[in-house]
Amino acid sequence: MRNSITEILKIKYPIIQGGMGNISDPLLAAAISNAGGLGTIGTGNLPISEISNKIKVMISNTTKPCCVNIPISVHPCTKLVAEEVIAHRVPVVSLSAGNPSDLIGMFHEHNIKVICVTSTVRQAKKAEILGADLIVCEGYEAAGINSPNESTTMTLIPQVAKEVSIPIVAAGGIADGKGFAAAIALGASGVQLGTRFVATKEANFHPNYKKSILKANDESTVIVGRSFKQVRRILKNHYAESLLNLENKRGSIEEYKEKTSEERHYIGTVEGNDREGFMTGGQIAGLIEDLPTVAEVMENMINEAKDILNPNYFNLSLKLI
């Protein structure tokens, strides 16, 4: 499948892996790139040396384009991270959680494509003006840190599509070909997946984390942090309850930050301890019931979407009404 996203990023499928912060798995990212998508590792707030090691593992395990996500307001030394990305000649960078104005030109000077993650029309328009090559529009359904304005993917994508001319990637609430087809119908040219890629054979996360996703239903995620203006979507479990209790008793922002630190994220997802760490998960978790390979995820998604978007499918549907 070829379109504006695949042309810009030089990939087979217009499917991008979401950055997963400190728990990013470079081997998973490499597997996604090898299978035709854009594998991504997130820097979170990791030390530069650890970021460098993860980049080295990722690029040494694939000859295909891959990406590094930099959450601008999360990492204390974004310029140093940017220099690390440039030094390793990573072909694509994803910028999120902050103002990308000081970084886009820097990456373009080194022929690195820039993706900007946005959650509002205003942010998307600004990213285009600043020179982003494409935009990821992330709805409130997505796992992890979310925008406090809580716009959903279905409402966000068409509004952004009306206002920008650069390609759009839809993120949040997508795990199969139906979601991909819906994103295309709304004005996107590709999709970004997070939770779906966690539940795959290649993902090096704890079995308890994967089982939590497989057992999830439509009510298995919860938003925490509203009262602290730090919105995050995670899976419901013992630890999630403790975070909600902290909010209900009006605990301190310092305590909340400690309980939602990247270390706590690691404890939940990599160590599988749902009493001392949290597990991120998008609302789409309720639709995920298997552990395929990343190649199977993407191939099945594209094939299903093609069947749905085919004009003959539409004509047949009309005849059946």
Image (tube, helix red, strand yellow):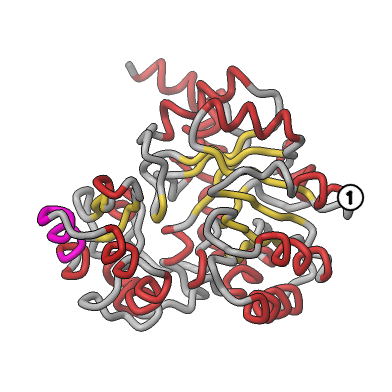
Seen at 28% across and 52% down, the residue is: 225
Q: Position of residue 248 (x, y in %)?
A: 12, 53
Residue topped by disc 1: 109
Quarter containing the N terminus: top right
Q: Is residue 299 visible?
A: no
Judge left or right: residue 105 versus residue 29.
right
Q: Is residue 24 left or right of residue 32?
A: left
Q: Position of residue 270 (x, y in %)?
A: 40, 79
Mostly what secondary structure, the magenta segment?
helix
Q: Quadrant of residue 294?
A: bottom right
**Residue at horizontal 63 percent and vertical 38 percent from the top:** 135
Q: What residue type is disc 1 on?
A: Glu
Q: Secondary structure at mark 1?
A: loop
**Does the segment drawn in magenta span residue 108?**
no
Task: Please say whether residue 248 is one of the residues in the magenta stretch.
Answer: yes
Residue 151 rendering spot, x and y as whole percentages: 39, 32
Q: Is residue 60 above or below residue 12?
A: below
Q: Which residues are magenta?
A: 242-249
Q: Nearer the viewer, residue 161 or 132?
A: 132
Q: Would you say 270 lies left or right of 220 here? A: right
Q: Is residue 289 visible?
A: yes
Side (left or right) of 17 relative to 291 = right
Residue 111 coordinates in the image, percent (x, y): 87, 51
Q: Nearer the viewer, residue 106 or 211?
A: 106
- The residue located at (17%, 54%) in the rendering is 247
